[in-house]
Every structure is written in C-alpha cells, then in structure tokens.
Amino acid sequence: MTITRPTWAYTLPAALLLMAPFDILASLAMDIYLPVVPAMPGILSTTPSVIQLTLSLYMVVLGLGQVIFGPISDRIGRRPVLLAGAAIFIVASLGAASSSTAVVFVSFRFLQAIGASAAMVATFATVRDVYANRPEGVVIYGLFSAMLAFVPALGPVAGALIGAYFGWRAIFITLAALALVAMLNAGVRWHETLPSDQDRPRRSVLPIFASPAFWVYTVAFSAGMGTFFTFFSTAPRVLIGQAGYSEIGFSIAFATVALVMVVTTRFAKAFVAKWGIAGCVARGMLLLLCGAALLGVGALSGSPSFVSFIVPMWVACIGIVVTVSVTANGALAQFDDIAGSAVAFYFCVQSLIVGIAGTLAVTILDGDTAWPIVCYATTLAVLVLLGLGLLRSRTPAPASPST
C-alpha cells in the first residue's frame, strides 16, 4: 500500500523550532518542579506521599496517555490533537499554580500530563509523517534526545531560581507561558500531516506487537535512554556525595555529557547513510558496552572521578545518540498507515521498560556507584544485539540470478 506523504516547506532549523518545544515542555514539567517538592507538603497541608504522587502520576499518565492519543491522531489528524493537548497543558498549569489544596493540585497535575502526552504523540507522529524516509528525520530524533539531556540538568536549576525569587506558583505560570508561545506558533505554522489517503483501510494495532522489528528497535531505544536515565539518577550521588563535587562543578560535568550528545548528533545523518539502521544500532550497543566496561573498571579502581565516571559516559552517550537517532525508523517502518498508534506504543513501551528496569537497577544496586548504569546498559545492549541477530536470520537471502 502506497502512502501519500505530506510535504513541509520548512528548513530543518525552522521545523525544530516548531516541534521541539512540545517535547521539551513535557519533560520540563517534571524537572522544573523538583526543587519545590520538599516544601509542597507544608504549603498544601498534606503528606509527602501525596506530593510524590504528583510526580509518579505525571510519569504514568504521560506514557499511557499516548496509547489513547495515538489512535485518535490517526483518525482526526495530528494538528487538532497537538493544539488540544497544548491547550489542556496551559489550563492545567495555570490551575496548578492557583491550587490551594492537595486534591486540586493533584488533579491539575493529572490534566497537565494528559495535555503533555497528547502534544508529544502528535509531535512524533508528525516527524514520522514528514521525515520517515528522509535523512533529516535522523537528525531530528538525535537532536530531540540531545535536547532532553539538557532538561534534567537545567530544569531544576531554573525551577530553584524561579521558586526562590517569585514563589512556587511562578514555576507553573512559566510552564503555561512557554506552552502558550509554542501553541500560538503551531496554530499559525503547523499544517496537518496525516496522510491524505482517506479511503485507505485502517489496520488493527495488533500487528505492531507481533512485529519482531518493533520490539528489537524499541528495546534498543530503551537501552539508550535508560542508560542515560540511570546515569541521571546516580550522577548526583556519585559526584556530589562520593567525589565531593560542588553543585556548580556537578552541573558543569553533567553538561559535558549532554554536549557530547549534541556534537554526535551533528554526524548522525552520515552514520545512517554509511551503516544503515541496523548497523547504527549494533554500533550503538557496542559503544554502550564499552562505556559500561570503562565504568566498571573505574568503579573497581577506587573513588569516583571525572575520568572514571564522566569520560566513560561520553563513550556511552555517543552510542546513545547513534542508536536513538534511528530506532524510530526501524521500529515503525511497517506502520506508516497507523503512525500515530505505532509512535504511541513505541514511547509507551520504552517508558515502561526504562521506568521499571531503570528504577530497579538504581534501587537494588548501590545507587552511590556506577554499577546501576553498568548492569542496565550491559543487559539491554546484549539483548538488543541478540535481537538484531534474530532479525538478520529472518531476513530472506538475496535470490541468486537465474541461469
């Protein structure tokens, strides 16, 4: 079945400026709020467990909500889902800012996650619609991942400054203002990208889960992003708690890792042209294994340092970018006619893998060391390499020329 793809008359920087804010805001709504979490039980006259619910509930709804909005975007289009999601996010952020009780605050955080989820799935479905077979798509996926690497580093700093000078409510007002700017820009420039073949048959989503390629490349994405998640979860405890870094020193060291990801993205298009999707993922997994091995050696050698903890993460993060730049195209290649649904399940599954396996690694192993990163990266990378071997064995060999 041939899918009629829409065209966007935007340069790559213009497209990124249009789409990236929605992806960044979904993550920023979690990270920018972290500095005021300890004070919120007293402010709202509730317990710390209720405030913790606003964090875990946001993450769960952000992931599961995409399963709802993906199929909806396949039916009514990306643009209405995106704009509705942005509007919900704005209203919910303002509602959270005006909350005076815990119940109201939790309710608006729930709505905020719904809006972020809708905007995210519409954004990535649009990337799939427009750039599925174009080299720019690799660059966009890589840059999105690199940008998100900065959010956990800069978001809490921004939240602490805003909260200190203007109060905790200003944090949510800031989120609403940023989302409003992004929505107004999208309202003018974001054209519908849902393929125009309205008479095409609509497939069930079940073939997505029966696709070996979907699972292999989704787990590969989970390997990359989960490695960064475990790094983000352990880095403050390792560098500040064990190595004695100041908060500024930690931020600078963390920023070098994100910078490596940004620089690597510059070469992502050349990598996929040379190695292809499977080749990029295989090399990405090998780099993850190399980074994990170096981290393991550093952990065994004594006290953590920049050389033993950060430099190995440079190696791992090159592998992360090489991997996540192509995994969406590998996982979703067979599902262009239900791209919204496929994108939704792709992100939902990886969120569950990263959230569960990554959290278990940090919880069960010593979170004050590099071992959670080592174990997570090694386990997932080996699984992906085995999966790539399975995919290769299932690929029919080229037919020999007839004589």
Image (cartoon, rainbow, N blue to C red):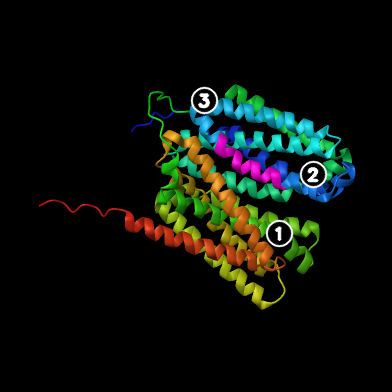
Tell me, yes or no, whether the two marked residues, 1 and 3, touch with CB atoms within 8 Å: no
The answer to which of marks 1 and 3 sits earlier in the sequence is 3
Q: CA distance from mark 1 to mark 3?
A: 45 Å
Binning the other alpha carbons within 10 Å of mark 2 as few (below 14), some (14 to 19) or many (20 upward) gives: many
Q: Which residue is mark 1?
A: 253
Residue 243 visible at all = no
Q: CA distance from mark 2 to mark 1?
A: 20 Å
Q: Vertical placement of 379 versus 260: above or below?
A: below
Mark 3: amino acid: Ile
Q: Position of residue 386 (x, y in %)?
A: 43, 62
The answer to which of marks 3 and 2 sits earlier in the sequence is 3
Quarter the N terminus occupies:
top left
Q: Position of residue 120 (x, y in %)?
A: 60, 37
Q: Which residue is mark 3?
A: 76
- Depth check: 9 or 393 in front? 393
Q: Which residue is mark 2?
A: 159
Q: Where on the picture, by quarter, is residue 196?
A: top left
Q: Position of residue 192 (x, y in %)?
A: 51, 25
- Depth check: 349 or 134 in front? 349
Q: Which stretch appears magenta?
A: 56-68
